[in-house]
Image (spheres, rainbow, N blue to C red):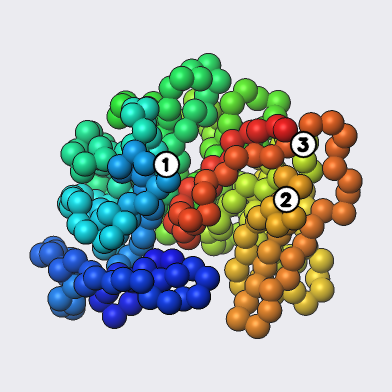
Amino acid sequence: MLFCKDLRLWIADGCTGEIRTSIPTPRSRPSAARGGRPYERILGDSIAIANLSGGPHPQEVLLKDRYTNIWAFDRDLKELWYHECTTGHFPAVYDIDGDGCDEVMAGYSVLDQDGTLLWELPYGDHQDAIAIGPFDPDCPDTLLIGLAAGEEGFILATAEGEVLAQHKLGHAQKLAVANLRPDLPGLEYAVITFWGHPGITAIFDCKGRMLSSFELVPHASPLMPVNWAGDGSELLFLSAHPAEGGLLDAQGHRAVMFPDDGHPFYCCTALDLIGDGRDELLTWDTESIWVYRADTPLPDGPRYRPIRLPHWNESNYMAHVSLPHWE
């Protein structure tokens, strides 16, 4: 377990909480940001795990400040490298070149495992979420990068930095990639806006063409994919609110609603808790947590078990990627 506290980065035993080691967080660097005075060391804005050494398991640690600096550490918290860029909220890691080591995308910059800058996109506002994967069946060997890019909107690029599509629809805050339209080839991208005109949701096909847009609520949402029916299609988790929330299809219809039974709806997520491939819906506040599951039987035949990002890099700012997979 890794966490930042009291201007230190800590590693603790995940079962007992016993502290194994800690180091001071990196010293704060000069910033052009107005207002206040920075602490001597960074607070630690987000932590991600990557495989920078090519070992059998990811064991390197990425730590960033709010928007301008990112550091990499080995498993013993020895600093490996540092890079300055517009980091965005949360880095994405993916073995883009197939050498067994992860590349790191921080903001619009793609870094090799040793911190060398490979390329970067020329945009100003920070990005909010990054999705990397083989999303277009016409190009099965081509990795694509989807970006919820703040004021730059939604951006689709290749893993070599070629921009394929851009839609300035407002401050794009969240991003999900999943099989939202089984009638179309490839996966779809879903983004929702936050600042300016919050709550505008747009769905794009695998080539970055807009399919639909709608505004159901005046706020952003996690928009996480949900395998609810087990038939290969997925829905989007808007929220657990009994009137304003529910699970959405790609046209913006509320396909599943929550009962008005007094459940909390402050936070929510979707997880396959019982291991049958289908997701349960979790919703909670500071007092209680409630779990809902589909009450219909699973379809006969092969089981749909979409491949999701690893839980150890779970973040409020991560893109939700759900790759189709049958067993």
Do callouts 2 and 3 mark residues in contact (Cβ within 8 Å)? no
- Asked which quadrant contains residue 158, the reply is top left
Q: Amino acid at mark 1?
A: Pro
Do callouts 2 and 1 mark residues in contact (Cβ within 8 Å)? no
Left or right for 94, reference 262:
left
Category of crowding for the residue at label 2, using alpha-carbon neighbours closer than 10 angstroms: few (below 14), some (14–19), many (at least 20): few
Q: Is residue 140 above or below residue 12?
A: above
Residue 169, how many percent across, how many down? 45, 44
Category of crowding for the residue at label 1, using alpha-carbon neighbours closer than 10 angstroms: few (below 14), some (14–19), many (at least 20): few
Left or right for 315, reference 45:
right
The secondary structure type at the circle numbered 3 is loop
Using the image as rendered, state which of residue 93 and residue 50 is in the foreground. Answer: 50
User: How far apart are the alpha carbons under marks 2 and 3?
Assistant: 11 Å
- Asked which quadrant contains residue 41, the reply is bottom left
Quadrant of the frame with the N terminus: bottom left
Question: If you read the primary sequence from the N terminus, does the residue marked by circle 3 or circle 1 appear first?
Answer: 1
User: How far apart are the alpha carbons under marks 2 and 1?
Assistant: 25 Å
Residue topped by disc 3: 303
Q: Amino acid at mark 2?
A: Gly
Q: Which of labels 2 and 1 is toward the front?
A: 1
Picture disc at residue 275: 2
Residue at image position (19%, 66%) is 26
Q: Is residue 324 above or below residue 140?
A: below
Residue topped by disc 1: 56
User: How far apart are the alpha carbons under marks 3 and 1?
Assistant: 28 Å
Using the image as rendered, state which of residue 38 and residue 70 is in the foreground. Answer: 70
Residue 170, how many percent across, how many down? 43, 49
Do callouts 3 and 1 mark residues in contact (Cβ within 8 Å)? no
